[in-house]
Image (cartoon, grey):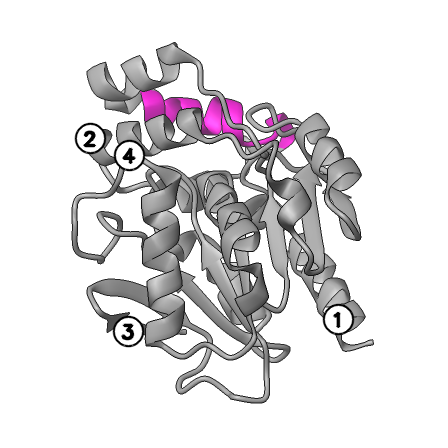
Amino acid sequence: MIARRQNGMAFLAGQWPLDPDRPTLVFIHGSGQQGSFWQAQVDGLAEAANTIAVDLPGHGNSEGDGFRTVTDYTRSVMGFIDAVNAPAPIPCGLSLGGAVALDLLIDQGHRLKAGILANTGARLKVLPIIIETIENNYADHLKGLIEFAVAPANQEDEEVCRKVLACSTAGPLVTANDFRACNAFDVIDQVSHIHVPVLVLSAVHDALTPVKYANWMAANIDGVRHITIDDAGHMSPIEQPDAFNAAILGFLGSLDR
């Protein structure tokens, strides 16, 4: 895995330079996190595609202070895709990152090969207590990441918990604003604008973006492939990386066919 920076945005890549004959998976993390969340995907899928995991502005090693709207993050990711000249880009986002990917598919779909929406929804309302906890007791928020975002059976896995916390580094101000961005996000009336292949990934034990969110997208976006990951919660790329990667590999294969 290679760490680089482009126009102020840090990213991890499975290989560099990018292969112009391969599609480019652009992984977009969730609220308060950073690109290392996707390490198992950047490494595990590097033989099938170009793989890149970005640190959104204000997160990880990227510059800036973060944003309060999904639209601003979308603009920064599209600018990044252009800056690295990513061949046949396929945004793959989780939660907040999924909202960014969905926004890209709606507004920039003609420039994308496909999209992957993981543990996210077309509307992402956030309970006020979540933002209050982040602002008033960030340690409790981090503890809650394990209790509510990881499947109960995986909460005993020290390696899973360590990885989740290791990539949750943005701090209370940026993280709270990320959740505000999620709370304001609503593109339910716009998903009909999507006309490229889409993979929707959900997780059986996801309490934050339940499977019903994915079911709605699968029913309302043309040509969606929907796969639910067993034995995982909201952090399924870390909890069940093999199953998560296998779903993406199958989707890439369908694009080739």
Specify the label residue 171 is tagged with: none
Q: Which residue is depicted at the point 46% across and 29% down?
A: 146
The residues tagged by marks 2 and 3 sit, at their Cα atoms, a distance apart of: 25 Å
Q: Which residue is depicted at the point 36% across and 32% down?
A: 181
The residues tagged by marks 1 and 3 sit, at their Cα atoms, a distance apart of: 28 Å
Tell me which secondary structure the magenta stretch mostly adopts. helix
Residue assigned mark 1: 255
Q: Which residue is depicted at the point 28% across and 34% down?
A: 68
Residue assigned mark 3: 4
Q: Say if mark 1 contacts mark 3, CB within 8 Å.
A: no
Question: Dot 1: what SS?
Answer: helix
Q: Nearer the viewer, residue 131 or 123?
A: 123
Q: Position of residue 186 (x, y in %)?
A: 51, 30
Residue assigned mark 4: 68
Specify the label residue 173 is tagged with: 2
In the image as oriented, which residue stretches furthest toward the right? Answer: 257
- Residue range highlighted in magenta: 141-153
Q: Nearer the viewer, residue 101 or 35?
A: 101
